[in-house]
Image (cartoon, rainbow, N blue to C red):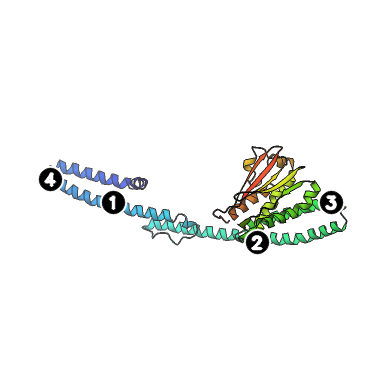
Amino acid sequence: MKVFFAYLKRKRRSIFLFGAVFLILWIVLGLYRLPTEPVAYSFALCGLVLFIEFVSDFLRFRKRHQLLSHIQEEILNTDENLPQAANLLEEDYQILIRNLFQKKAAIETQALQKQEDMLSYYTMWVHQIKTPIAAMRLLLQESGGEHRGLEGELFRVEEYVEMVLCYLRLGSTTTDYRFYEYDLDKILRQAVRKYAPLFIRKKIALQYEPVHFTVLTDEKWLLFVVEQVLSNALKYTASGSITVAFHAPATLSIRDTGIGIAPEDLPRIFECGFTGCNGRLDKKSTGIGLYLCRRICKNLGHNIGATSQIGQGTEIQIDLRRRDLEIE
């Protein structure tokens, strides 16, 4: 019905003109007192012809509308399926569309090239910066533990470097996801081993029992998520414990006894750059870690959520069940 009314609106001038012509003819013929029967018969035949043309033209209009509606999404990727122009005006519009499409394609190609160049540069930079970081760590180890504070800060530098690389890779047009079945305990132990010195330094108890669960995922990217969650838990927990647990059917839980998250901040903690009240207390917070976790979980087909209470701690739940992937 919407298409029909749109067609009537498009043809309103023609309908008005035909009606005016019929009215004028009827008045003129009436003034000359011509016989009513042949006049009515002529008008009926003309009306039938016009009706047939009207229906035929409407069907063509609807078919063309359906065709154009079908290619609305395709036009973002190709301009090859545009219908044949019915008149000079439509041909002009199609030329305009093709010119805009070519300009869009050129801009996208240029943007992608710049993005790939930037990714290549920062990837090289990350690998280059790792060399002096490794050298500094070796020097600190040789000092016999006299600079524990410097070791902690160096560890944070390494975290930020990895975060930059992860952020850039997520924005790349190519991905390196490899989906296999992995032992979840193996992934968890890698993350715990990485942060073991920080657990010891802050005297935070770790409560973890093997979960004996196999998950279909990408090991490297899921490990990054777990590491980010552990890093946040350690950052905002001054004393107490961090619990790594597993709940049926497939939910990984990481719970801390830290400062918690304000209720008004909780719905926004996975937004890019959002730091909330805790971020204002910790001036070094970037608001990127949990944002990356959400994007990675989305790409892996998992879900991530959080619950928290001020002064009692925060729990991050990672639902490892698979859903339809939305690879970026």
Instruction: Give the residue displayed 71% in from the left and 62% down from the top.
Output: 124
Q: Amino acid at mark 1?
A: Val
Please identify, in this view, whether the residue under mark 4 or under mark 2 is nearer the observer.
Answer: 2
Please identify, in this view, whether the residue under mark 2 or under mark 3 is nearer the observer.
Answer: 3
Q: Which is nearer the eye, 315 or 40?
A: 315
Q: Amino acid at mark 2?
A: Asp
Q: Earlier in the sequence, mark 3 or mark 4?
A: 4
Q: Amino acid at mark 3?
A: Arg
Q: Is residue 181 visible?
A: yes
Give the Cα distance between marks 4 and 2: 83 Å
List x then y, in percent, for residue 121. Answer: 69, 61
Q: Earlier in the sequence, mark 1 or mark 3?
A: 1
The residue identified by callout 3 is 148
Q: Secondary structure at mark 2?
A: helix
The residue identified by callout 1 is 55
Location of the C terminus by quadrant is bottom right
The residue identified by callout 4 is 37
Q: Which is nearer the eye, 17 or 300?
A: 300
List x then y, in percent, for residue 236. Answer: 73, 43
Location of the N terminus by quadrant is top left
Give the Cα distance between marks 3 and 4: 111 Å
